[in-house]
Amino acid sequence: MIAKAMENGFPPEKEGKLRTIVYMYDIWRLHLGPDPPAKVPPLELRMKKGAKPFRCKPRAYPPHVRKFLQEFNDELVRLGWVYENASSRWACPALPVKKPGKDEFRQTSDYRPANAETEPIAGVMPILQVITEHVRGMCFFGLFDFIKGFWQLPLAKASQEILSYMTDAKVYTPTRVPQGCSDASLHFQVTMERCFPKLLYKHLLRIDDLLLYAEDVDTYLEKLGELFSLMNEFGLKLSAAKSSLFERSVKWCGKIIDGDGVRHDPQRIAALREMPLPSTAGD
């Protein structure tokens, strides 16, 4: 990571200070392991009055998908992120999704039945047009990814069974916040904002994509030290593979951000232009 920062133009005379800041705390991971959950309040679901448990029927999956589900959930059990729960009154179907361009899967869950019985959090997600105003005139940037972001956050004991899911063989109950439940994204956003109040107007955060920015290198290093200190304080982990310590131009949430300002990513614009025109009223 430091070598990449140097390639991106980080001043050589400041390398020692950058190296000290980066290695000061145990916040980097290539794979999220059996670390304890972050030191933040757990997500607690609020159910609608008269909510009734939902239990799906087992689904049939092809052999290679069954193998993936078995191995993936064995690993989650080993890490303590889920546990087998044959007595659960709730169970939504596991939903394996093929990764784009790869012969690999990621597991999601179809939580629509459970979401329909919960009262969602009333909160506000950042408006990109508003928050990106703060980066105009900035020249130095860092991009940081919370590795397996939602899985780092604890799930309240009383809410765990509600978010149970079923594979072809077993029912599993999560102990961490799973993607797909109605409150997950907003809870993550609000939790991170509460973790980093000292960095207000010093960084941009939209769910698990964090952008640090500054006018000069010394200020950037100061902010970087603050950020990593707070990460360590709350037990949060960053992806060493997906984070970048130093950039002069970044792509963040569909925008190009650099010293010249903020503009739309031309690749996204091209993709929109290439979309076929609707042929029916349903389209």
Image (spheres, rainbow, N blue to C red):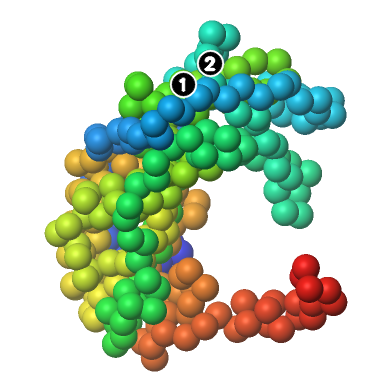
Foreground disc of the pair 1, 2: 2
The span from disc 1 to disc 2 (Cα, nearest Å) is: 7 Å
> Residue placed farthest to the front in the image?
50
Please name the residue shown 66% across and 24% down the image: 56
Q: Position of residue 145 (x, y in %)?
A: 43, 54
User: Up-down: is 223 above or below 44?
Assistant: below
Left or right: where 129 falls relative to 94: left
Q: Which residue is mark 2?
A: 89
Q: Which secondary structure lies at badge 1?
A: helix
Q: Which residue is mark 1?
A: 161
Please name the residue shown 39% across and 45% down the image: 120
Please name the residue shown 42% across and 84% down the image: 262
Write down the quadrant of residue 44 in the picture. Answer: top left
Q: Position of residue 216 (x, y in %)?
A: 23, 79
User: Up-down: is 199 above or below 71?
Assistant: below
How packed mark 2 is, by other alpha carbons closer than 10 Å (few <14, some 14-19, many 20 or more), is few
Q: Are marks 1 and 2 in contact (CB under 8 Å)?
A: yes
> Residue placed farthest to the bottom in the image?
260
Kind of residue at badge 2? Arg
* Residue 93 seen anywhere in this rendered image of the structure: yes
Kind of residue at badge 1? Glu
User: Up-down: is 265 above or below 57?
Assistant: below
> Residue placed farthest to the top in the image?
87
Q: Position of residue 153 (x, y in %)?
A: 36, 36
Write down the quadrant of residue 234 in the picture. Answer: top left
Left or right: where 20 falls relative to 240: left
